[in-house]
Amino acid sequence: MISRFIIYGLLGWCIEILWTGFGSLLKGDVKLTGRTYIWMFFIYGLAVFLEPIHERIMSFNIFLRGGLYTVLIFTIEYCTGWVLKRVLGVCPWDYSKCSFSVNGLIRLDYAPAWFIAGLVFEKIHIGIERISSVINI
């Protein structure tokens, strides 16, 4: 479980750096500056807890699965942001100035991205399962 937590944490970091890097291009930054936070490693690592959910819902319709992942990811993002804000006094991401923000902790307009991310997670989980059967992670 720890090795999978690390895999999801590292993958999340990489994806976030790509997301923010390409997002910076839309703002005119041709350097493609990507960024993330150390805290995000631990938050992305929590994807390991989505594995048993994936195993239970894999027979469901793709839209139902994607919708469920969207709700779960929003919930995780909101809760971890809320905890960080309480403990540290600040949340690493601040969506308070964005449209469709809920308490500055989540952006509802990210729903399509989280829908797709959840379905991509399924493919990653399946890949990790195949690899782990060979090398025992």
Image: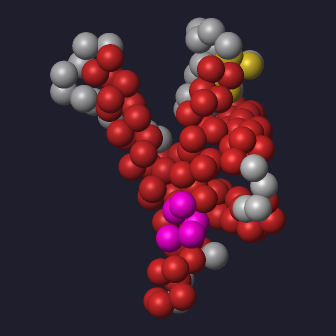
Give the extent of the magenta segment.
Answer: 123-127
Tell whether 15 sits left or right of 3: left
Asked if 93 appears above or below 39 in the picture, the reply is above
Tell me the quadrant of the picture where the N terminus can be found: bottom right
Tell whether 3 sits left or right of 80: left
Tell whether 116 sits left or right of 14: right
Q: Position of residue 114 (x, y in %)?
A: 61, 37
Most foreground residue, 90 or 1: 1
Residue 57 location, quadrant: bottom right
Asked if 79 appears above or below 108 in the picture, the reply is below
Most foreground residue, 137 or 67: 67
Q: Position of residue 81 (x, y in %)?
A: 68, 35
Residue occupying image coordinates x 19% and y 22%: 30
Q: Is residue 126 magenta?
A: yes
Q: Report whether residue 68 is seen.
A: no
Residue 31 location, quadrant: top left
Q: Is residue 105 magenta?
A: no
Q: Position of residue 45 (x, y in %)?
A: 59, 58
Residue occupying image coordinates x 74% and y 19%: 102
Q: Position of residue 78 (x, y in %)?
A: 73, 34
Q: Report whether residue 29 is seen.
A: yes
What type of secondary structure mainly makes up the magenta span?
helix
Residue occupying image coordinates x 62% and y 9%: 99
